[in-house]
Image (tube, grey):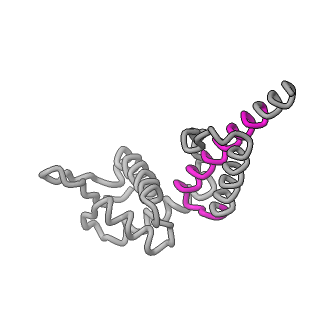
Amino acid sequence: MKNSKNDRRQQVRRLVRERAEVAGQILRKERSWDQRGIASTRAKLARIDAEILSLNPEVDVKDIRPLRLPLPVHTADTRGFSDKLLSLLIETGGQPISGAKLREQMQERFGIPHDTSAQRKLTSEQIFFRLHVWEKKGAVKRIPRENGVSNLWIWVGL
């Protein structure tokens, strides 16, 4: 009898760990551009939750925190993203443009997902990272706007 209780505890511990990993995978997928497989991952999470509750109904699965693994760097698409952003800046013809407007145009013209706030935030972060790098190199110029409104950016050229 004691042996089966230990087996159950070990099984619940293993499932809790697996649930935390799968929940972390869902968080990463929600923040990434690639949404493939998110439905099947959510289904896997539901299966794990049901299995945990069948072994120990006292466990509140919502209290199990997801493992927050670092986001994968989009190294394969980094160059393509920069090229697309660069083409948008050049098309402005030296006219000021806001970072939000750049994000909107990137998402609309190049099919970058923007369904969730996490996807929009990721795109904005990548845009602003590149803009700041290019600002240091002298390729773009930042024009601060008054009243706390976001900055405008101008393509100066290399």
Q: Would you place residue 153 above or below residue 62 in this image?
A: below
Q: Residue at x 40, y 55 (%)?
A: 124
Q: Main secondary structure of the magenta part?
A: helix
Vertical arrangement, residue 67 with respect to residue 110, above or below: above
Q: Relative to the observer, which residue lies in front, 59 or 72?
A: 59
Residue lying farthest to the bottom in this orientation: 109
- Residue drawn at (68%, 38%) of the image: 16
The residue positioned 19% from the left and 54% from the top of the image is 149
Q: Is residue 49 left or right of residue 119?
A: right
**Count of numbered tags:** 0
- From this view, report whether residue 57 is shown above or below residue 144: above
Whole-percent x and y of residue 20? 64, 41
Task: Give the image quarter of residue 14.
Answer: top right
Seen from this angle, which residue lies furthest top? 2
Query: Image point 64% across, 63% down: which residue?
Result: 39
Asked if one can make out residue 68 in the rendered structure from this viewpoint, the answer is no
Question: Which residue is nearer to you in this view: 102 or 154?
Answer: 102
- Magenta highlight range: 10-37
Q: Position of residue 22 (x, y in %)?
A: 66, 47
For this orientation, the residue located farthest to the front is: 1
In the rendered view, would you say 106 is above or below 65? below
Quadrant position of the N terminus in the picture: top right
Q: Quadrant of residue 13?
A: top right
